[in-house]
């Protein structure tokens, strides 16, 4: 079995474990669909669509601060240089606007691989997001986020000039919440 198949399976198991731990222990977990609009690469402005992804994340409450969360998750999708798989980590601040809506602000990093043959190459990302969340019921919410994300794949420099670039991600989130107890 190739290394990329093993990595995809490992990410799938990780994402599922996040889902089940979220259902059992409660804070928030979500499923995301993302669309990436390219902004620039190698210092040149370049518009267009650069790909999309699906992700799953689990949000851990940070200490006694109900508004702060730490995010862990996994993402797979395709971007300007091809298919990739990432493990995600980040911080999210939640500011309630009403009993059912809140403003979300956050930062996120991703570490993973571009799924190239004959061997995968390292990929790193760093991004900022802002958005909103609407609570339908005690256990279900939907969110929309937008932001700015930087990608780098240093080893891809041997193959193309497109080894680092900026995207404008638009994300739709479906949140599942369950209180401990």
Image (tube, rainbow, N blue to C red):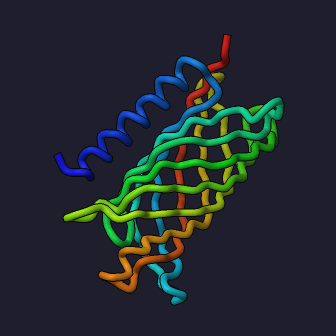
Looking at the image, which residue is at 56% across and 33% down? Answer: 29
Q: Is residue 159 left or right of residue 117?
A: right
Residue 167 shows in the view: yes
Which quarter of the rendering shows the N terminus? top left
Please, which residue is most extreme toward the bottom here? 44
What residue occupies the far left of the structure in this picture? 1
Residue 168 vertical placement versus 157 (above, below) = above
> As rendered, which of 59 and 36 lies closer to the eye?
59
Q: Position of residue 61 (x, y in %)?
A: 71, 32
Residue at (51, 42) in percent of width and height: 73
From the viewer's perspective, is 23 left or right of 65? Answer: left
x%, y% of residue 133?
66, 42
Nearer-the-camera pick, 173 or 129: 129
Measuring from the top left, give residue 176's x and y in whole percent: 56, 29
| Residue 127 picture quarter | bottom right
Q: Foreground residue, 29 or 138? A: 29
Confirm whether residue 174 shows in the render. no
Image coordinates for residue 87, horizontal then vertical, percent: 47, 48
Q: How many marks?
A: 0
Give the vertical position of 43 relative to 28 (above or below): below
Query: In this image, 169 relative to 27: left or right?
Result: left
Up-down relation of residue 40 to residue 51 (above or below): below
Q: Would you identify the image quadrant in which residue 168 lies?
A: bottom right
Please name the residue shown 49% across and 31% down the image.
Answer: 18
Quadrant that contains the C terminus: top right
Image point 44% across, 53% down: which residue? 86
């Amino acid at each position: 079995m190739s290394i990329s198949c093993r990595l995809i399976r490992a990410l799938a198991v990780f994402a599922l474990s996040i889902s089940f731990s979220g259902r059992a222990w409660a804070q928030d977990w979500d499923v995301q669909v993302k669309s990436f609009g390219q902004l620039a690469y190698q210092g040149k402005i370049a518009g267009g669509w650069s790909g999309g992804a699906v992700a799953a994340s689990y949000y851990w409450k940070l200490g006694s601060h109900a508004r702060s969360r730490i995010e862990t998750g996994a993402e797979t999708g395709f971007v300007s240089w091809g298919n990739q798989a990432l493990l995600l980590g980040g911080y999210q601040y939640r500011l309630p606007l009403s009993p059912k809506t809140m403003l979300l602000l956050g930062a996120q990093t991703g570490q993973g691989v571009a799924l190239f043959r004959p061997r995968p190459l390292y990929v790193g990302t760093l991004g900022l997001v802002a958005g909103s969340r609407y609570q339908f019921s005690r256990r279900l919410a939907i969110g929309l986020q937008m932001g700015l994300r930087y990608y780098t794949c240093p080893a891809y420099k041997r193959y193309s000039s497109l080894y680092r670039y900026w995207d404008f991600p638009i994300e739709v989130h479906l949140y599942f919440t369950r209180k401990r107890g």
